[in-house]
Image: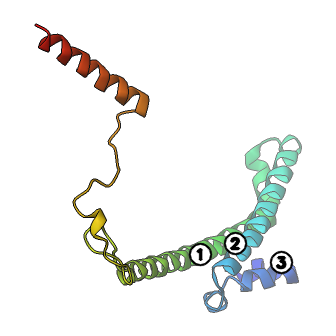
């Protein structure tokens, strides 16, 4: 960043830009980085708006956009400073979010590996074996859309079979 542009920043803006340095951001967690991202985005938006408003106001006086361009150099430079700061913070947020997602994924996979399965063939830990349930259906009924529809289908099949048997 050019020293001349940095010197035009207010103290609060200098502090904000300094918070986006690599060293300062290494200590921040994801929520703090998102807060910093919001603050930098607001500052960038402020100077972009100022530049656009002042530039559009200068066009009639200057006689064109090209002539009005150099007048708002300071606002344009400040917007650029905050744009670069925003990019730095955004990259850091991306790195930290990816790391958090990977950690969470690893944690979930580890938890899934540690859970013992208590499927239909193997009783869970501490469960008593029951001979009454062996060899019987589980009570699950495959349906195609509802009990009434299934009953209707079975009844229609029974009527067709009865008609054939009566021949």
> Is any atom of residue 146 visible in this view?
no
Sequence order check, earlier mark of 1 and 3: 3
Query: What residue is shown with label 3?
Result: 8
Tag 3's secondary structure? Answer: helix
Q: Which mark is residue 150?
A: none
- Judge depth for marks 3 and 2 and give the one in front: 2
Contact (CB < 8 A) between labels 1 and 2? Answer: yes
Name the residue tied to disc 1: 93
Q: How is the image coloured?
A: rainbow
Residue topped by disc 2: 37
Q: CA distance from mark 1 to mark 3?
A: 28 Å
Secondary element at image label 1: helix
| Residue 41 rendering spot, x and y as whole percentages | 73, 66
Q: Is residue 85 left or right of residue 91?
A: right
Q: Residues within 10 Å of mark 3 (few under 14, many from 20)?
A: some
Residue 118 locus on image (x, y percent) = 34, 73
Q: Residues under labels 3 and 2: Cα distance?
A: 22 Å
Q: Position of residue 33 (x, y in %)?
A: 67, 78
The earlier-in-sequence mark between 1 and 2 is 2
Spatial distance from mark 1 to mark 2, Cα to Cα?
A: 8 Å
- Viewer-nearest of discs 1 and 3: 1
Q: Is residue 84 above or below residue 150?
A: below
The picture quadrant where one finds residue 60 is: top right
């Amino acid at each position: 960043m050019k020293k001349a542009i940095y010197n035009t920043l207010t103290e609060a803006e200098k502090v904000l830009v300094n918070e986006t340095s690599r060293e300062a951001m290494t200590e921040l967690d994801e929520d703090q980085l998102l807060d910093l991202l919001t603050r930098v985005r607001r500052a960038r938006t402020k100077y972009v708006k100022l530049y656009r408003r002042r530039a559009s106001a200068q066009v009639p006086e200057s006689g064109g956009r090209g002539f009005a361009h150099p007048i708002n150099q300071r606002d344009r430079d400040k917007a650029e400073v905050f744009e670069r700061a925003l990019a730095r913070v955004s990259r850091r947020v991306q790195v930290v979010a990816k790391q958090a997602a990977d950690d969470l994924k690893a944690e979930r996979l580890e938890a899934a590996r540690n859970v013992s399965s208590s499927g239909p063939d193997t009783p869970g830990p501490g469960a008593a074996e029951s001979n009454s349930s062996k060899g019987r259906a589980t009570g699950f009924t495959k349906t195609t859309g509802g009990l009434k529809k299934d009953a209707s289908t079975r009844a229609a099949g029974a009527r067709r079979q009865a008609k054939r048997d009566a021949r």
